[in-house]
Image (cartoon, grey):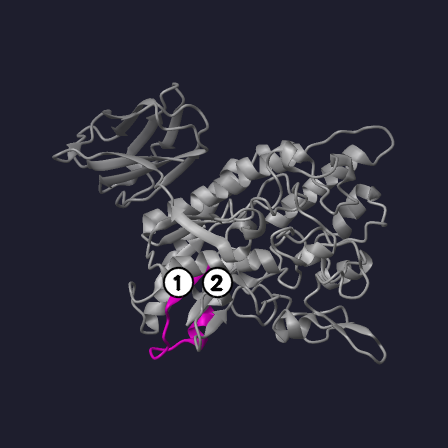
Amino acid sequence: MFIQLGDSFGVGEGAGWKGNTNQSAGDRLGTDVAARYHSDLPGWTYHPETYVYQSNTYRELDGHWGTNPCHRAYQSPISYVKGWGDQVLNLACSGAQSKHIWPASAGGVEQHPGLKTQLDQLKDAVSASSDVAMVAVSVGGNDIDIPAFDKPGFGELVVKCIESFVHTHYPDGFDPQYCNDEIAAGVGDAVSDVFYNQLKTIDLVRQTLAAEGHPIGSYKLVLTGYPSITPTDESDWFGAEGDGWANHCPIRKADSRYINTHVVSRLNDVIQAAAEEKGVGFINMEEAFDGHRLCEAGTVRTASAAHPESAEWVRFLDVDDTINPLWEGIKSLLFGDSPDEWKSQQLRSQRSIAESFHPNSYGQKALGYCLRTYYNDDLDNSLQRCHIAGTGSSSTPDNMVTSTRAALYKATDDPADSVTIGYPLTRTLTVPSSVPAGHYFQWLPKITHPSKGQLKITLQAPDGTTFMLRDFNFEDTGDFGNGTHTSNYTGDPSGTWTLRIWDGISSHDEGTLDKWSLKLF
């Protein structure tokens, strides 16, 4: 059994398209997997509930078919891993956050009325006799909660960037705006929180399966990162930025670069950090769509779009391009909390607005081949990056390969004997100049102390920046325990990092520092 948990990048959102085209009639130049032609009336008909998504997870405005809009696709990434006769259990759901995976007993919440959390569904679906081979988890993008945004989620980020594009290119007079101005202030903390959600998710997956007779080590557990879906370099786009609405990719080029380098890269790094801490596998998908990203130079939207080597592997913004984008990007694409089925109808989408900016059929297959390689090559608990091996006519999803990805930089101070905490205890670690600047540092301590509130702890970076890891709080009793502290740090990490620990009780003899580590990424 191959199990998928997570969000739209695991569920297969967008799998019903082989490339993009503005042609809305017929089979959309061969790109629409759901299109079927009948020689008698009504001619062309469309059946995503039959040919793309499990019928109970695809819902239209009139309520037909689905009890929920999870959009569980038949050709999701996990479907490419299974062999003949193997079972796939895709419990992911489009729009899911980590809390929609966790059991209700551990703080999980229903994503849709009557839909159990994913691990509660898993509990019902497996038993000791189930042959669980692999669990893939794709989640975190919708956990990003930036203070300037109305609600959490990567989709909210995209909407804000569309608004900035419209303000820049469409109002009377030029009113340049960048969504990265809103993102920058809160993205560091927002993405770092994903790390702790990942740790909890890993623990709860293991606990759920162990309770059903599947101990740690009896199956592969792998976290998957996120791909860049639009180009990073301005020279990699086709068309002028102002043509973005007509081209169905209304994102400012500088905003796209910022998202890739400051959001997608951070997200992949924190997911990797969680995988390393828990000893599970990780696949970085950041480069998986290179050469086939949305509006990337060299891709086509003619009849050739139905061929993977020349197509985009990401679904474009599924909005009728004759609709005027004014009114703040059609009021944030018609009100963020409205049902996708209603928005799709108002925006005259070819199918569903929810599919926009997600991997299409080719993208799903590419991600699936990354997972399949990981499984078939027995890359258990390893760190991998997935990318296209071929070029030209060989630049297809069938030619995805994985390569070993380096572990995040980690330095450890491990004294031969535990060191008594004084007033203060000072310890240092030196980071070599070969370590590049990143986004975060993590402090991983092992401290023995009966009353954590007695401790004040700081960490000073080589540039003199001092971080307060904890302050005195004598009401905070109990053992110190161990954990991970994550902070934003984008400076040059090379040089001496200085840890200072104060014990606020005069005896200074109750606690010891056993060791500590510094991780940079």
Q: Is residue 40 left or right of residue 212?
A: right
The disc, 1 or 2, on the residue closer to the chain's N-terminal end is 2
Q: Residue at the spot x=34%, y=28% of the render?
A: 458
The relative height of residue 417 versus residue 42 in the rendered view (above or below) is above
Q: Is residue 301 left or right of residue 392?
A: right
Q: Position of residue 182 (x, y in %)?
A: 64, 34
The residue lying furthest to the right in this view is: 172
Q: Is residue 122 magenta?
A: yes
**Residue holding disc 1:** 205
Q: Are marks 1 and 2 in contact (CB under 8 Å)?
A: yes
> How many numbered marks have been drawn onto this rendered protein structure?
2
Q: Is residue 162 left or right of residue 194?
A: right
The residue lying furthest to the front in this view is: 393
Q: Considering depth in this image, is 234 or 496 the residue closer to the camera?
A: 234
The residue lying furthest to the left in this view is: 417
Q: Secondary structure at mark 1?
A: helix
Q: Position of residue 419 (x, y in %)?
A: 16, 32
Q: Mark 1 belongs to which amino acid?
A: Val
Q: Residue at the spot x=40%, y=51% of the render?
A: 282
Q: Is residue 147 visible?
A: yes
Q: Position of residue 404 (x, y in %)?
A: 36, 46
CA distance for labels 1 and 2: 9 Å
Mark 2, Cα crowd under 10 Å, few <14 / some 14-19 / many 20+, is: many
Q: Residue at the spot x=69%, y=36% of the render?
A: 252
Instruction: State the image quarter where residue 457 is shown.
Output: top left
Q: Is residue 8 visible?
A: no
For the C terminus, give its image quadrant. top left
Q: Secondary structure at mark 2?
A: strand
The relative height of residue 213 versus residue 224 in the rendered view (above or below) is below
Please give the range of residues in magenta. Answer: 120-137
The mark found on residue 5 in the picture is: 2
